[in-house]
Image (cartoon, grey):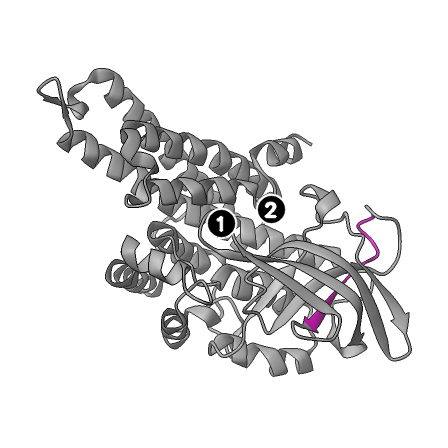
Amino acid sequence: MNFDFSQEQQMLQDSVSRFIQDNYDLESRIKSAGSKFGFSQDHWQTMAELGWLGLPFDEADGGFGGTQIDTMLLMEQFGKGLVLEPLLASVILGGGALKRGASTELKAEILPGLIDGSRQLTLAYAEEQAHFDLHDVTTTARSDGDGFVINGHKSMVLHAATADQIVISTRTSGGQIDEKGISLFLIDADADGVKRDNFPTVDGLRASEVTLQDVTVGKDRLIGELDGGFAILNDVASDAILALSAEAVGAMEVLYKDTVDYTQQREQFDHPLADFQVLQHRMVEMFMEYEQCKSLLYRATMEAAQGSSAAQRSVHALKHLVGKAGIFIAENAVQLHGGMGMTEELRIGHYFKRMIVIDAQFGNADYHLGKFAA
């Protein structure tokens, strides 16, 4: 495999890195997280102007025709800065479903606003009883005249409070855990019958519990084929796992480098902590776990971009390794920083919280180990 980035990809990586360095110090992040929207609207518009929101969409839809590799470069830098803006929810999740299954008319209506930053989407897929299974769906959509009526409840919907539209997975036929019989619809977030209970998450982001009661939606809002939405949902989830894993790898790099720097400065018994062999071994283990994750991230992302039949298995392996190694690195970074590691004033604790949440999104390490083995 060729691990060299193209000139355009290298320019993208450099521009995102500069943006993070210039705009994402810890104080600014805490201020944005506590604001009304939970992120910076100015940063969001800047991302749109730089073309990042249009990166994964086809040129025919107004995007730049990027692949999962381009998204990986973006999200790895986002992980280094603990970026709050809803690119994952709006572009990769909501936009990912639309680009795969929406009609030409629906794409023409929605995607230009998504790409220029004036419109936000999200994906409502998780349900309380489902654990991590995307096919465990009790939210129903029954046919009613020229449209459908949706009833149900969705949990942990990322950035639903600021979303204009929500892509929602529903059951239109079959049993509760059947893969066939799942349909995706695009609904307005402020439509009659939609209730959003919004809350901050432990890692500084925002999410909502979304209740749907007799929400009417037209047939033109169907994404993909009726009863055939699971394949789209699964592909979107795979892209999201790759993006989250890239973000995690970026965060891991900051965690181990900050820890090395701290142990070189902090003295104990008239010696820097870095002089103690047992701590040197610990930091080598942190570095090795980070490098393994980065290597597997590259492999899984390239396989997905090339449409390899082995891509899905590599995605399961990656999510398992990222969950296991990410928490190992984060826990050791906190421990080696001592009591300072859990303070709000030091960024280590913020990265630790983000790593825990990433492990839980779209299936934790144990869940994906089982999927890999199966």
Residue at image position (37%, 36%) is 290
Which quarter of the rendered picture does the C terminus lie within? Answer: top right
Q: Secondary structure at mark 1?
A: helix
Residue identified by numbered label 2: 362
Magenta stretch? 178-187
- Please tell me the numbered disc located at residue 244: 1
The image quarter in which residue 373 lies: top right
| Amino acid type shown at disc 2 | Phe
Residue at image position (50%, 36%) is 323
Mark toward the start of the polypeptide (2 vs 1): 1
Residue at image position (51%, 44%) is 357
**Residue 102 x, y percent position in the rendering:** 68, 72
Main secondary-structure element of the magenta-colored stretch: strand
Residue at image position (76%, 78%) is 220
The one of 196 and 237 positioned closer to us in this rendering: 196
Left-right relation of 64 to 216: left
Left-right relation of 247 to 280: right
Q: Does the CB distance between marks 2 and 1 fall below 8 Å?
A: yes
- Please tell me the numbered disc located at residue 82: none
